[in-house]
Amino acid sequence: MIVTRDRAGLVKERETLGVGAGGATLGLVPTMGALHEGHRSLLRLAHEKADHVAVSIFVNPLQFGPAEDYSRYPRTFDADLEVCAEEGVSLVFAPAPEDMYLPDRQVGVSAGRMGAIVEGEFRPGHLDGVLTVVLKLFNLVRPDLAVFGQKDAQQLAMIRRMVADLDVPVSIVGAPTVREPDGLALSSRNRYLSRDDRAVALALSRALAAGAARRTPEEVRRAARAVLAAEPALAVDYLVLVHPATFEEVGDDHSGEAILAVAAKVGSTRLIDNVTVTL
């Protein structure tokens, strides 16, 4: 497995792998490290789709707000490399912030109107930061495809929109959310949860399951809200039923697929989750 931290090394190692220009195909799994079983599922899916798999490990400062957990976000680089090696990763790109961003950086990607709703309402600028770093990674790594988890459903939808709007020659692959046996969606932030916090956090997946069992928008929302309301220790940011491509709230007459998404704080830890429902 090749590990490189700088751009020059990345260019050299791509050539070593023989990717591009009609050669082997390359799949990219962008991560912020602290790899878990959910990330392993992304790596395995990338292996199914491409000859070689590259992983980026970079805690992106642009997607954290002033009061968010950038400084304490888990950094487990050595353990992450072990996971990558076990999963047959060919290339790991792990740049420092100064290698990714110029000190006087001025230009980035705007997530537009879609980036100002749902997650964007509660984390202003977050999706701008996500799209900016993803586009930079696409330009640097030059993969044929990239794999993202459905757990960050709005992020996945925005990346698909960016690729379409800007004609980025990368195929975007969505991977199903991986859950613990008790239903909690895997997240690097789960390690912050105490035993009591974890019990509270299970209300998120229970609410989504209750909503997904219903078939009209009104019934979906009502069932999910009832579960959340029964857990007073949750500080809910939102529970929304939205269109999968636009993340705009669907009307009561909507039929077909929609995404039921939730975000809440459990103690000091903010968690997100979602499920696709058929109306």
Image: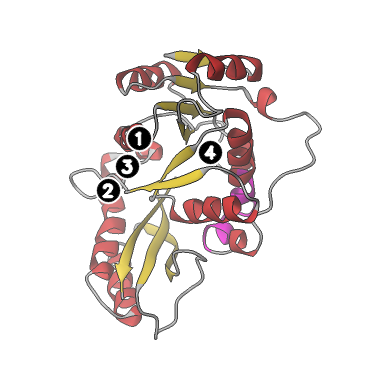
Residue at 64% in and 36% down? 136
Residue at 68% in and 53% down? 110
Give the SS element for disc 4: loop
Amino acid carrying label 1: it is Arg
Instruction: Please determine whether, in this image, residue 173 is positioned above or below residue 246.
Output: above
Judge whether residue 154 can be spotted in this image: yes
Pointer 3 and pointer 2: residues touching (CB < 8 Å)?
yes
Residue position marked by numbered label 2 in the rendering: 184
Instruction: Please determine whether, in this image, residue 105 is positioned above or below residue 254.
Output: above
Between marks 1 and 3 in the image, the one whose residue lies nearer the viewer: 3
Residue position marked by numbered label 1 in the rendering: 191
Q: Position of residue 223 (x, y in %)?
A: 27, 74
Amino acid carrying label 3: it is Leu
Q: Which residues are magenta?
A: 118-129
Is residue 126 covered in magenta?
yes
Q: Earlier in the sequence, mark 1 or mark 4?
A: 4
Residue position marked by numbered label 4 in the rendering: 69
Calculate the distance from the C-alpha at mark 1 to the C-alpha at mark 2: 12 Å
Between marks 3 and 4 in the image, the one whose residue lies nearer the viewer: 3
Calculate the distance from the C-alpha at mark 1 to the C-alpha at mark 3: 10 Å
